[in-house]
Image (spheres, rainbow, N blue to C red):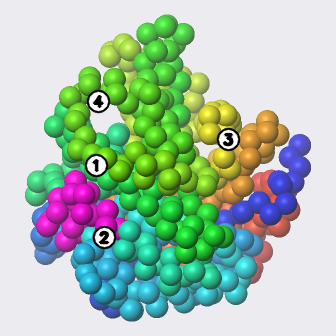
Amino acid sequence: MTTAFPKGFLWGGATAANQIEGAWNVDGKGPSTADMVTGGTFETPRHYTATLQADTYYPSHQASDFYHHWREDLKLLHEMGYNTYRMSIAWTRIFPNGDDEEPNQAGLDFYRQIFEQCRDYGIEPIVTISHYETPYHLTQKYHGWLDRRVIDFYVKYCKTIFLAYKDLVHYWLTFNEINILIMMGGYVGAGLPLKDGESMFGGEMTDATRQDCFQALHHQFLASAKAVQLAHRINPDNWVGCMIAGSLSYPLTPAPADVLLNQQEMAMNNWFCGDVQVRGAYPYFAKHYFDEHHIHLQTEPEDTAILKAGKVDFYSFSYYSSNARTADPAKAESAGNMTFGAKNPYLKYSEWGWSTDATGLRVYLNDVYGRYGVPVMVVENGLGARDELTAEGQINDDYRIAYLKEHIEAMHAAIDDGVDLIGYTPWGCIDLVSAGTGQMEKRYGFIYVNRNDQQQGDFKRIPKKSFYWYRQVIASNGANLNPDVLQKLI
Ligand code: BGP
């Protein structure tokens, strides 16, 4: 039987600018890498075009039109009882090219209104500074994060927003899923150039692409460390976290080769970035990995001190599913959130190939807290699914409630285990564009957005059954997870 969560627990939801805002070129906003990527499906990968093509669908251009619906959206989040909301700032609303001299005032004003409204609602914003979008100009002129000068552009952007929202925002995440650079290539995470028409995630990782990804990652580590120090200097109340794609995996069998492989995958996919950002130094296994893959980082003598001085205050991560690893190449592969592995016979898989594994969340929380001992936040979690409107105009998303319920129970168990878990922001609380496939119809939200993949629909917001359920969860501080909630009009 679940009892309440600790007092002051942060309950909310999460979104990202390029997946929800739309208005991609409005009020002085410049194009970002996300604006150059087409729609796709599970079977058809999204691809990048070097210039925008007529008659091609770029989902970020309209997304869920939050830019014109934010008042209504925040009101709904408030009605659900949120005391936190994780969102990102689009760098290109503030600095349209990334390397501009002056910030764009209209962009600063846009987010100020949002943060003021959050304050009035008692919602603490958690702001991701860079969520899968780099100013496109930086990709074209500097090869994205491959160029060390981009660190200074990022730090200038950080300084601008830290000062602008000094009294309104206290929680910051430096880079969304920074470890994507280890797992899936560099365009999405670091704006590394792609060839025209190439899949957004690039091809297979080779030693050459890996070299670029780790160099870009090194620059992001330095940028993050500098941002942490700056945030603390500007306001000692600022709390800055890393954000890691929680990539839990198990050995598929007890065969020692599977166990060893899994240990290595866990280390590279999770602890590599976590160690640099939380402990302030590259882990012991980095050298062996770099040697094995012929990676030679270009560094400066001051880098070690910068990383050490810029340790984050807390560890945040996304968690959707788990994977299984086998040293036997013949075993079937399954998709997951950015990592691939063998199909785990004990788990169920979604239409998009993602497993549901709530126990894995408890395992991961214990692993993370055991390793780092800093407060932990789950800043993404959820079930991407197709929702159907009933004849009465309702969405009975019991499958989503079941998924979230299990994961909240797992978080509760982890707290009982002793983990210092301080917040939960399930992903895509308002339906938005899928990062992986570009679909609107892979929905995560408590709030339905009337828009489909054929670009039809008026963006109308409709609370789903899970909206009323989550409201009850928050109101009881996690004590009442009863799924048979009444759908009442708000
Ligand atoms: C994470 C990203 C999010 C989000 C989520 C769900 O990797 O941080 O931006 O999109 O995954 O993934 P998808 O949208 O592909 O279903």
Circle 2 or circle 1, nearest the eye? 1
Disc 2 marks which residue? Answer: 153
> With 76 as the anchor, is 289 left or right in this view?
left
Residue 384 in percent (x, y) is at 51, 53
Whichever of callouts 3 and 2 sits on the residue coming sooner in the sequence is: 2
Q: CA distance from mark 4 to mark 1?
A: 17 Å
Asked if the residues shown at circle 3 and circle 2 are in contact, with their CB atoms under 8 angstroms apart, the answer is no
Residue 234 in percent (x, y) is at 55, 75
Query: Callout 3 environment at 10 Å: few (<14), some (14 to 19), or many (20+)?
Result: some
Query: Callout 2 environment at 10 Å: few (<14), some (14 to 19), or many (20+)?
Result: some
Q: For the residue marked with disc 1, what is the amino acid?
A: Glu
Residue at 55% over, 54% down: 312
Disc 3 marks which residue? Answer: 373
Circle 4 or circle 1, nearest the eye? 1
Residue 440 in percent (x, y) is at 41, 64
Look at the picture and state if 453 lies above or below 212: below
Residue 87 in percent (x, y) is at 52, 69
Q: For the residue marked with disc 2, what is the amino acid?
A: Phe
Q: Quadrant of residue 188?
A: bottom left
Residue at 31% over, 67% down: 152
Q: CA distance from mark 2 to mark 1?
A: 18 Å
Disc 1 marks which residue? Answer: 300
